[in-house]
């Protein structure tokens, strides 16, 4: 069974090269740029109720939607690796393996899956419309929680003898972030279709093979 594949907005802005070597360099640079983008937005913290509004999740969803499935996942995998190695790319300029094995490690792993799924759906043209994009980003956010919350629930705080537990995981890992996540989803869902509309209006970027339907295996 085949699904129509259109490509993402980055394929219009930075078209593919006919040279395989150039295409590999292009994709590598896009992956690195995605990692840097997430790293920078992870440091953004705006006072918000009940917890500060941070840019990390917003960046993850945007990177998936802009770069597509494999490049988005690769960017977040690189983010995971450099952060685990100690670079201060996580929120509050944190880094190191202890962050991965700590309370929030599951969310960071979930970023990779979310970027891949959001990117895969965006490649099918969903990123051109606001409402379908909202639904896609909600799915991406759910995937982050699907890994992050069980991880948090099974985490044992330093000095404790029992795991954090599901009730605490909900109170500290979901409930405080609902309002902020809703705002992030709205921002991301508006930015991507708005970007496509701007490209269409200005005619920026040449039309290439990824702008039209392309068959891809489901």
Image (cartoon, rainbow, N blue to C red):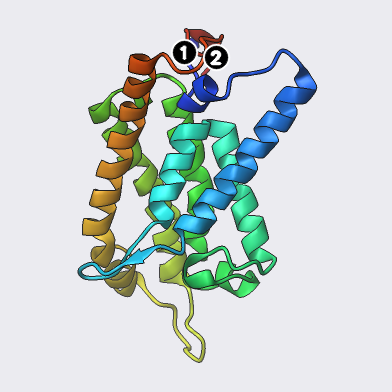
| Residue 146 in view in this figure | no
Q: Report helix, strand or loop for mark 2.
A: strand
Frontmost residue, 139 versus 48: 48
- Residue 50, by quadrant, is bottom left
Frontmost residue, 63 versus 144: 63
96 lies above or below 194:
below
Is the C-beta separation of discs 1 and 2 under 8 Å?
yes
List the residue tagged with mark 1.
3
| Residue located at (64% from left, 50% from top) | 78
Frontmost residue, 120 versus 91: 91
Residue most toward the front? 202
| Residue located at (77% from left, 19% from top) | 20
| Residue located at (51% from left, 31% from top) | 68
| Residue located at (59% from left, 44% from top) | 33
Position of 47 with respect to 45 (left or right) is left
| Residue 106 in view in this figure | yes
Local crowd at mark 1 within 10 Å, few (<14), some, or many (≥20)? few
């Amino acid at each position: 069974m085949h699904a129509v594949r259109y490509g993402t907005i980055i394929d219009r802005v930075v078209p593919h090269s006919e040279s395989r070597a150039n295409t590999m360099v292009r994709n590598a640079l896009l992956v690195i740029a995605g990692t840097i983008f997430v790293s920078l937005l992870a440091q953004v913290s705006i006072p918000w109720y009940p917890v500060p509004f941070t840019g990390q999740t917003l960046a993850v969803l945007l990177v998936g939607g802009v770069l597509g499935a494999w490049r988005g996942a690769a960017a977040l995998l690189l983010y995971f690796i450099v952060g685990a190695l100690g670079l201060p790319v996580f929120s509050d300029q944190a880094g190191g393996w202890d962050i991965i094995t700590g309370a929030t490690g599951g969310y960071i792993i979930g970023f990779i899956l979310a970027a891949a799924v959001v990117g895969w759906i965006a490649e099918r043209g969903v990123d051109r419309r606001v409402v379908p994009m909202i639904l896609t980003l909600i799915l991406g956010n759910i995937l982050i929680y699907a890994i992050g919350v069980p991880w948090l629930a099974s985490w044992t705080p330093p000095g404790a003898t029992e795991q954090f537990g599901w009730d605490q995981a909900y109170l500290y890992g979901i409930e405080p972030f609902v309002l902020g996540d809703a705002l992030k989803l709205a921002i991301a869902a508006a930015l991507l279709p708005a970007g496509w509309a701007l490209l269409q209006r200005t005619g920026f970027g040449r039309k290439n093979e990824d702008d039209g339907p392309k068959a891809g295996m489901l």
